[in-house]
Amino acid sequence: MKKVRIHHFAEMKSRGEKITMLTAYDYPTAQAFDAAGVDMLLVGDSLGDNILGYDSTVPLTLDEMIPFARAVSRAANRAFVVADLPFGSYEVSPEQAVESSIRMMKLSGANAIKFEGGRRIARQVKAVTDAGIPFCGHLGFTPQSENALGGRRIQGRGEAAYEEMLADALALQEAGAFAVVLEMVVAPIAKRLSEALDIPTIGIGAGSDTDGQVLVWLDAMGVGDWHPSFSKQFASVGEAMKNGAAAYVSEVKSTEFPDATHTFDE
Ligand code: KIV
């Protein structure tokens, strides 16, 4: 099984092979996705709301994220691991972005860093890539700015919005990004951006014409009750866990479990 490396994504784009990315936050989940052939595992800051129960990604800190990114990196034999920098750990200056990225890379073993924004963080991206750290961008709906954006809103409607997003995407590409996530962007705009950029686009709620797709794994595998309309449920993990736990409770209460096969004799 050949390890996925940074140059493979440009090669996939040029031959029209779609790139697959799923979020992962822990060792066993990352192991399963790695074995299934997912190209990129994203330790997204969505772990703040999905795993730690915060209201949004905003409260999450770099120190909280690192152990999750380390667990995912340990499990990834083939997949390329991208770790998010959380809100507040890169916006202040290029120096802050480089320090946070180096800390994440050294302590987690991730292969690349992702953070949100376009032209406003281009200096940070340049400093990070100049430090030898692969960088993935994130445009469209950027959850860390949800207070400024007025909530979860679809992005990219209209020609002016396209021009803005193109300028942001080109700034990231120019600064050395190897790929860019497009979140909740109307499909025709995501298609035009994908055609205009040399680097691959990875869409989430951005239609089928991006160079790859990413989903939050809990949405894709049916854990929890919230199912965004752009996500598809590929499994029913939550239901399977609920049924398994109910069977366990029932068998322990009825003394059916453990039986002789689960018991050590003298
Ligand atoms: O944190 C995350 O899960 C993400 C994806 C939505 C792309 O950034």
Image (tube, rainbow, N blue to C red):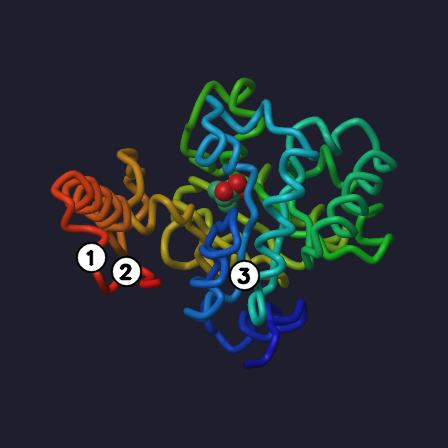
Q: Residue furthest bottom?
A: 1
Q: Residue 36: x, y in percent? A: 41, 69
Estimate how packed mark 3 is, as few (under 14), some (14 to 19) or many (20 or more) residues with alpha carbons within 10 Å: many
Secondary element at tag 3: strand
Query: Going by the image, does 23 lie left or right of 220?
Result: right
Q: Tell me the distance, in whole angstroms, between the alpha carbons under discs 3 and 1.
A: 42 Å
x 65%, y 46%: residue: 114
Image quadrant where one finds the N terminus: bottom right
Estimate how packed mark 1 is, as few (under 14), some (14 to 19) or many (20 or more) residues with alpha carbons within 10 Å: few
Q: Report if the beta carbon of the residue with label 3 is closer than 8 angstroms to ligand 1.
A: no
Estimate how packed mark 2 is, as few (under 14), some (14 to 19) or many (20 or more) residues with alpha carbons within 10 Å: few
x 42%, y 40%: residue: 184
Q: Is residue 68 visible?
A: yes
Q: Which residue does the numbered mark 2 point to in the structure image?
A: 262
User: Between disc 3 and disc 1, whose residue precedes?
Assistant: 3
User: Between disc 3 and disc 2, whose residue precedes?
Assistant: 3
Identify the amino acid type marked 2: His
Secondary element at tag 2: helix
Identify the amino acid type marked 3: Met
Front-lying residue, 251 or 239: 251
Q: Which residue does the numbered mark 3 point to in the structure image?
A: 40
Q: Is residue 216 above or below residue 14?
A: above
Identify the amino acid type marked 1: Asp
Secondary element at tag 1: loop
Query: Going by the image, does 247 lie left or right of 265?
Result: left
Label 1 near label 3: C-beta < 8 Å? no
Dividing the picture into quarters, in which one does residue 124 lie? top right
Q: Tell me the distance, in whole angstroms, between the alpha carbons under discs 1 and 2.
A: 6 Å
Q: Which residue does the numbered mark 1 point to in the structure image?
A: 259
Label 2 near label 1: C-beta < 8 Å? yes
Q: Report if the beta carbon of the residue with label 2 is closer than 8 angstroms to ligand 1.
A: no
